[in-house]
Image: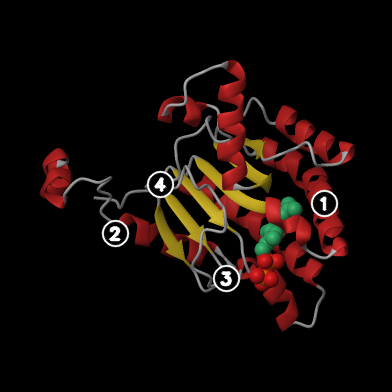
Amino acid sequence: MPAALPHHIAIVMDGNGRWARKRFLPRLAGHAQGVEALRRCVRACAARGVQVLTVFAFSSENWSRPADEVSGLMGLLAKALAREVPDLSRDGVRVHFVGDRAALSDSVRRGLEQAEQLTVGNSRLVLNICFNYGGRWDIVQAAARLAERGQAITEASLHAAMGLAHVPDPDLVIRTGGEMRISNFLLWQAAYSEFVFSERLWPDFDEAALDEAIASYGARERRFGRTSEQVCAQQPEALQA
Ligand code: FPP
């Protein structure tokens, strides 16, 4: 029986700065290489039948980085969108941005909107790019929207008001770069995700590393709070295999 394939993979793409430092390059060169790794990863996920890929590209806290790195990341995003979105669209990728757009410049915001509009009809792979995103921000903005509408706060209503309401929760969260923390990523949605921490720096994350993470996921037993016996009783075909 083939190992389970995650429907939704989410990635903290960490290690661009260290990748650059090891080569005596500016940090931005690491981020540029990170864009290449992202492009490879999107295609590899689509080829394997993964339906949703969510990546952490710029966190609410990244504004506190040096000004030239922040403006460099904004410029990199604009360039990457102009260069990649037509190809992504041809490959059936639908792009969504998740995060607080209010703090972004008009031109960056327009770039995000255009990418979303251009790919709106696609359904092979949903690519969620978390940009100016934080898990706490997402929970607070969802609660504030419900309060504004006078709606009761329940798990279902909060979920529906959050940035990833259009996709199921991530099955697998990968973090590259050797750190083992969540760093304010998908705090709500990752409640029952499986985690893989890779020592690879993000620019070095290749298809083999992706396959390793997927294989690790395939070997896990997801219990969602139940016992192992209950899980097996619900999946008799898994016992026969
Ligand atoms: C973390 O590495 C990475 C980021 C803060 C940015 C991630 C962005 C990309 C992979 C490029 C794609 C993004 C855009 C804008 C399209 P780090 O800088 O914290 O690395 P370090 O821990 O080695 O210093």
Task: Name the residue tied to disc 3.
Answer: 177
Residue at 32% from the left image edge and 49% from the top image edge: 4
Real-space Cα separation, disc 3 to disc 4, in angstroms: 22 Å
Task: Name the residue tied to disc 1.
Answer: 74
Identify the secondary structure beneath mark 3: loop
Query: Picture quarter containing residue 73?
Result: bottom right
Which mark is first along the chain, 2 or 1?
Answer: 1
User: Residue 98's x, y, as percent?
Assistant: 65, 39
Real-space Cα separation, disc 3 to disc 2, in angstroms: 22 Å
Q: Is mark 4 within 8 Å of ligand 1?
A: no
- Decide if residue 241 is in sight here: no
**Local crowd size for mark 4, using a 10 Å CA cut-off: few (<14), some (14–19), many (≥20):** few
Which mark is first along the chain, 2 or 3?
Answer: 3
Q: What residue type is labelled 3?
A: Gly
Q: 66 and 217: which one is in front?
A: 66
User: Residue 233's x, y, as percent?
Assistant: 11, 42
Q: Does the residue labelled 3 lie within 8 Å of ligand 1?
A: yes
- Decide if residue 87 is in sight here: yes
Residue at 25% from the left image edge and 48% from the top image edge: 223
Task: Name the residue tied to disc 2.
Answer: 219
